[in-house]
Image: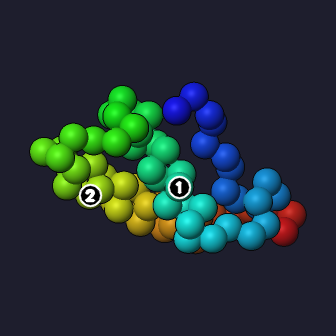
């Protein structure tokens, strides 16, 4: 849980998969919630947060304009 979330935009990452975006979202939710794996009563909220962050991340990466590229 101490690792940094890697940068997912060019020039730091040329090929970014859906799995990369999902992993970053999961890592973010784990970090801010303090849970590596949530208890059963928190699982739905945890997964919903991961899904929302994954969508927001994909939207952000899709809209960024990187100069010089």
Percent of width and height locating residue 31: 44, 34
Q: Secondary structure at mark 2?
A: helix
Work out whether mark 2 precedes mark 1 in sequence or the reverse, and give the earlier one.
1
The residue indicated by pointer 1 is 23
Percent of width and height locating residue 57: 49, 59
Q: Which image quarter holds the C terminus? A: bottom right
In the displayed structure image, the side of residue 40 where residue 1 appears, left or right: right
Which residue occupies 51% across, 66% down? 58
Is 29 above or below relative to 23?
above
Is 58 above or below relative to 40?
below
Task: Answer few, some or many: residues within 10 Å of disc 2's Cα (few below 14, many 20 plus, some between 14 and 19).
Answer: few
Is 57 above or below relative to 63?
above
In the displayed structure image, the side of residue 49 where residue 16 appears, left or right: right
Decide which of 68, 53 is in the foreground and name it: 53
Which residue occupies 54% across, 51% down? 24
Q: CA distance from mark 2 to mark 1?
A: 14 Å
């Amino acid at each position: 849980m101490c690792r940094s979330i890697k940068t997912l935009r060019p020039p730091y990452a040329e090929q970014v998969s859906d799995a990369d975006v999902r992993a970053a979202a999961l890592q973010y939710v784990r970090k801010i919630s303090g849970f590596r794996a949530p208890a059963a009563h928190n699982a739905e909220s945890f997964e919903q947060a991961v899904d929302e962050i994954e969508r927001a991340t994909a939207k952000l990466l899709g809209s960024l304009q990187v100069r010089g590229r």
